[in-house]
Image (cartoon, rainbow, N blue to C red):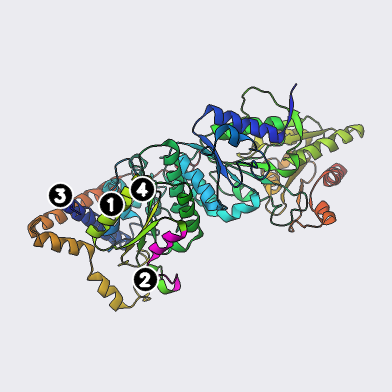
């Protein structure tokens, strides 16, 4: 499949934005400025970027607890995201949600979700809504390999299949469900095999190769838009960091050699290498991109710092309409 | 005046809303041909077709998720959980998602959906088809919880539930579907959070819900002969609760009985009792008496079930208690 140079550069840019956002958020967490459960997606950037570049502006996104990357790839902006992490009223959710509840409804981003698997039945519902209204939209629903063993996964995907809902279910298989490795979660090699159980298409792809993810998602999106119902796409990747930013470094449940091996498969480095070899981009240009993103992040942090905190008296706001 | 049953009143509301608002659809287990667990939607499939009367797999998570996803994207879904006992199978969808999305998104989006289900003990349905689980919804801010008793209220409140922009849990009750009452043919709504004084009285206040409203009215009528004047208040909406109407009544009578079918321990009656104790202590002339299902599981065997279900006998006992002092 022919992917334009501009698109390849955009992929690199989007992945870098995610990585640098995650790195900055991680630093702010360690500094005690960001609190709560911060689930970083360092190392998994190729999945949201490769998938979401196939979506249209009015398509919907349903995300997981590890969702910063999905939101950024779908049009999330640094300033309101950072402000949300700071608990400020200028955040997308006015400080009510935080990392696990990023939502930007104007861009049809229907939220990250603090409950593993929680977004899956909702995505199926959004899919039925699209069928009901007859609009030419679709949903991308991201979930982890851990979520693939919830009841919500079975119920949500089965229902989406039954009503032929236009939903792309993307399993970001990062090999670990907190501290539980794959072998204790299920006995499949490829989680996409589950698709057969629902009578839908399934495919597994290298989740650290953004071009491969893009191609697989492109094929899936074509099927979905052709009215052939949901597709299950598994992207094999790896969670570089702990389950959450506050996980003690002493918590060594992974073999350091395994981590080391995956760090070498960095999705950003992989694309950079290809683009440099093909002379699509130069080292200097990459350096420039990094700087630009850092500068935007500086501005976002400054914006978040300066933004007001919610008034205590507003505690009950937005509970009811 | 036309009289129809609670079941017919609910169906009339569903039919009206389906006919007048193409954003409304109904989904749940067996809702099409058999009309759902209690036959409320029977016949609607013929009028509205399978896009709008959606039979679902036995997947409660998917049913509520369907409602949430559709509500988030501009529709006004009604989903049915066949028995309230089954809400445990989709507790996350209700308690963490449906109730909270408007809040956690900082008000960016509304979740205008209705989850209809049925509560109450009857007919030897035993421990997993007889629960009155709604206190868990009252303990989850973000939900509106309705529990009507009469045909009139059933229609008006169901209309209101669909019209309202908040997620609504609509509790029906097994033992009252066939009760008849006056229901106007025209469209109307009953406002949220407004109790109804079903019978005025001077001596004792009974706050009663659903089937117990009828028991309270029946006992109150008997008591008239003994010269005891009882006021019966039906809160209709359990959350938000119309405390003002209850407080006004207690001011007048000084004696309060709460009759509700949820279990006594942390049940709806406990919430009303504690609110009155906190805010109306000076007006009380007798301890508040709660009537509810006993703190045990609903049994299968008939004599045990009769013992389990609260009703007129418990209300008479309670009247003796509050009267004595």
Which is nearer the eye, B170 or A49? A49
- Quick one: SS at disc 3? helix
Residue B31 colored in magenta in the image: no
Q: Which of the 4 image quadrants contains residue A250?
A: bottom left
Q: Position of residue B162 (x, y in %)?
A: 56, 34
The image shows a total of numbered marks equal to: 4
Q: Is residue A280 left or right of residue A184?
A: left
Q: Which residue is mark 2?
A: A248
- Labels 4 and 2 share a subunit: yes
Q: Nearer the viewer, mark 2 or mark 3?
A: 3
Earlier in the chain: of badge 2 and badge 3, it is 3
Earlier in the chain: of badge 4 and badge 2, it is 4
> Eyeballing the image, is B97 above or below A279?
above
Earlier in the chain: of badge 3 and badge 1, it is 3
| Quadrant occupied by the C terminus of chain B | top right
Which residues, given as a range, are shown in magenta?
A184-197
Give the farthest residue toward the right: B226
Q: Can residue B7 be seen at all in this image of the molecule?
A: yes
Q: Position of residue A69 (x, y in %)?
A: 30, 55
Q: Which residue is mark 3?
A: A6
Circle on res. A218: 1
Parent chain of label 1: A
Q: CA distance from mark 3 to mark 4?
A: 25 Å
Q: Is residue B1 left or right of residue B87?
A: right
Q: CA distance from mark 2 to mark 3?
A: 41 Å
Parent chain of label 3: A
Badge 2 crowding class, 10 Å Cα cut-off, few under 14, some 14 to 19, many 20 or more, is few
Pointer 2 and pointer 3: residues touching (CB < 8 Å)?
no
Q: Which residue is mark 4?
A: A224
Q: CA distance from mark 1 to mark 2?
A: 39 Å
């Amino acid at each position: 499949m022919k992917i334009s140079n501009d698109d390849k550069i955009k992929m690199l840019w989007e992945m870098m934005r995610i990585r640098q956002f995650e790195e900055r958020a991680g630093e702010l967490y360690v500094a005690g400025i960001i609190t709560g459960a911060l689930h970083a997606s360092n190392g998994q950037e190729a999945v949201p970027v490769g998938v979401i570049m196939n979506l249209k502006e009015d398509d919907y996104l349903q995300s997981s607890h590890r969702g910063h990357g999905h939101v950024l790839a779908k049009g999330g902006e640094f300033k309101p995201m950072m402000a949300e992490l700071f608990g400020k009223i200028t955040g997308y959710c006015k400080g009510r949600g935080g990392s696990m509840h990023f939502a930007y409804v104007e861009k049809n981003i229907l939220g990250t979700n603090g409950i593993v698997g929680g977004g899956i039945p909702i995505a199926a519902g959004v899919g039925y809504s699209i069928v009901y209204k007859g609009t030419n939209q679709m949903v991308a629903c991201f979930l982890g390999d851990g979520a693939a063993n919830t009841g919500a996964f079975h119920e949500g995907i089965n229902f989406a299949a039954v009503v032929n809902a236009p939903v792309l279910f993307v399993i970001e298989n990062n090999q670990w469900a907190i501290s539980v490795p794959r072998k204790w979660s299920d006995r499949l090699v490829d989680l996409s095999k589950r698709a057969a159980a629902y009578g839908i298409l399934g495919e597994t792809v290298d989740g650290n190769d953004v071009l491969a993810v893009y191609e697989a998602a492109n094929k899936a999106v074509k099927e979905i838009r052709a009215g052939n119902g949901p597709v299950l796409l598994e992207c094999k990747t790896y969670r570089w960091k702990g389950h959450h930013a506050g996980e003690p470094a002493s918590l060594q449940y992974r073999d350091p050699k395994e981590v080391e091996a995956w760090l070498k498969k960095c999705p950003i480095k992989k694309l950079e290498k290809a683009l440099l070899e093909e002379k699509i981009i130069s080292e200097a240009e990459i350096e420039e991109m990094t700087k630009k993103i850092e500068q935007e992040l500086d501005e976002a942090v400054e914006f978040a710092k300066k933004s007001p905190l919610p008034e205590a008296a507003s505690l009950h706001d937005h509970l009811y309409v | 005046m036309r009289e129809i049953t609670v079941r017919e009143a609910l169906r009339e509301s569903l039919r009206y809303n389906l006919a007048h608002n193409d954003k409304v659809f109904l989904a749940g287990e067996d809702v099409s041909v058999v009309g759902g667990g209690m036959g409320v939607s029977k016949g609607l499939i013929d009028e509205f077709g399978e896009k709008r009367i959606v039979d679902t797999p036995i997947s409660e998570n998917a049913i509520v998720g369907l409602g949430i996803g559709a509500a988030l994207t501009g529709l006004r879904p009604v989903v049915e959980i066949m028995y309230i006992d089954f809400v445990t199978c989709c507790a996350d969808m209700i308690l963490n998602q449906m109730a909270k999305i408007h809040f956690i998104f900082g008000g960016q989006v509304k979740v205008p959906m209705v989850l209809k289900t049925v509560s109450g003990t009857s007919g030897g349905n035993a421990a997993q088809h007889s629960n009155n689980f709604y206190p868990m919804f009252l303990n989850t801010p973000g939900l509106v919880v309705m529990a009507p008793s009469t045909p009139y209220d059933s229609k008006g409140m169901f209309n209101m539930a669909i019209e309202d922009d908040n997620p609504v849990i609509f509790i029906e009750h097994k033992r009252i579907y066939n009760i008849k009452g006056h229901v106007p043919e025209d469209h109307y709504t009953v406002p949220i959070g407004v109790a109804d004084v079903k019978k005025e009285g001077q001596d004792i206040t009974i706050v009663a819900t659903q089937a117990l409203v009828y028991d309270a009215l029946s006992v109150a009528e008997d008591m008239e002969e003994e010269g005891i004047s009882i006021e019966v208040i039906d809160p209709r909406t359990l959350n938000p609760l119309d405390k003002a109407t209850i407080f006004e009544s207690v001011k007048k009578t000084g004696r309060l009985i709460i009759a509700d079918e949820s279990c006594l321990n942390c049940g709806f009656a406990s919430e009303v009792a504690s609110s009155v104790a906190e805010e109306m202590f000076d007006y009380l002339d007798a301890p508040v008496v709660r009537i509810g299902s006993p703190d045990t599981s609903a049994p299968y065997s008939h004599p045990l079930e009769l013992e389990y279900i609260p009703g007129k006998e418990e209300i008479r006992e309670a009247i003796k208690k509050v009267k004595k002092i």
